[in-house]
Amino acid sequence: MSNELHTNRRNLLRGAGVGATALALAACSRTDSGEDGSLLEKAQDGGKIRVAYANEAPYAFTDGNTVSGQSVDTQLYLFDKLGIKADQIEWKRTEWDGLITGLGTAHDIVVAGMYVTPERCSAVAFANPDYVMPDALMTLAGNPGGYTTFNSMADTDGVVGVMNGTSEYEIAAKIFPEEQVNVQANLDSLILELKSGRCDAIGLTSANLRLAADADDELEVTDGFWLVDPETGEDIIGAGAAVFQPKDKDFRDAVNEELDKLLADTATWEGLTSEYGFTVEENHPEGLTAEDLCPDTYQ
């Protein structure tokens, strides 16, 4: 990570984003089901947990018949510390924009490397971040448009490709003209749009983009950067975490206790995440909490 990215990690986004009202309404519609025992208690008694993921490498993705990834391996480690085994998990592959809206109905927890943002915090209970990740832009090889960052690209006539429901989508809706935003459901679709000339660059986390570019000589990826909130001018720190229903905050808090221990043991943390390209220098959250990222909406 560059010195500038490292220094600016604590310049946290405080403004509300697109979709806050809809997310809050969705959360309000899901209350305690009235069943005996909390989700944590049931899980520690050997019950099944429905966990949603979005099939997005390197965070949570299907590898053959197995769900793998940085977020998956980290959470399975934490669950095991709580006495919850991998064979208790029922993995639910879900489109990104259904991860939060399906929480409490289609699934119980989200493990997808989802960024902690103030608007999402108003709807759900985030665990503390288990990684941080700068954004990047993917372009055709040679970067013919000369793009360097997401926000500076908005000052050009370039069309940016973004994935529906992501932080990049929310920022693009604020700073790009509508006709310069190409929205797709997943990275594979965005790459097809890029190669066809229907967008000029793709904005997403650097890890996703580097994995794809490493496998395709037609693509390249810029250096990492933080998104910038156009309303405050502050950096938006990309920090991912597991997501719980507000009524399951006891489960979230138990996970946080084990996560604190894991993050203090950087060798073990890197052992879990390094095969997915994560390093202590660039991706360790350094004690960053969900409440830091959501000072007004944390629950």
Image (cartoon, rainbow, N blue to C red):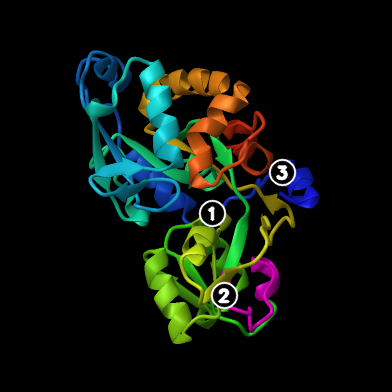
Do tag 1 and tag 2 residues touch (Cβ < 8 Å)?
no
Callout 3 amino acid: Arg
Would residue 270 be visible to someone looking at this image?
yes
Which residue occupies 42% across, 52% down?
Answer: 57
Work out whether residue 204 or residue 270 is closer to the camera in this orientation and state it: 270
Q: Is residue 34 shown in magenta?
A: no
What residue is shown with label 1? 207
Location of mark 2 (residue): 139
Question: Do callouts 1 and 3 mark residues in contact (Cβ within 8 Å)?
Answer: no
Q: Is residue 104 above or below residue 157?
A: above
Local packing at callout 2 (Cα closer than 10 Å; few below 14, some 14-19, many 20+) is many
Q: Is residue 37 left or right of residue 99?
A: left
In this rendering, the answer to whether 199 lies above or below 49 is below
Is there a contact, CB below 8 Å, between mark 3 and mark 2? no
Q: For the residue carrying disc 3, how many other residues have a C-alpha within 10 Å: few (<14), some (14-19), or many (20+)?
A: many
Name the image quarter holding residue 205: bottom right
Residue 109 rendering spot, x and y as whole percentages? 34, 35
Tell me the residue at 49%/19% (across/down): 258
Distance from label 3 to label 2 (Cα)?
25 Å
In the rendered image, the vertical position of residue 168 relative to residue 85, given as above or below: below
Q: Quadrant of residue 9?
A: top right
Q: Which residue is mark 3?
A: 9
Which of pointers 3 and 2 lies earlier in the amino acid sequence? Answer: 3
Please state which amino acid type lies under the numbered disc 2.
Thr
**What is the span of residues highlighted in magenta in the rendered image?**
138-154
Task: Check disc 1 and give the amino acid type.
Answer: Ala
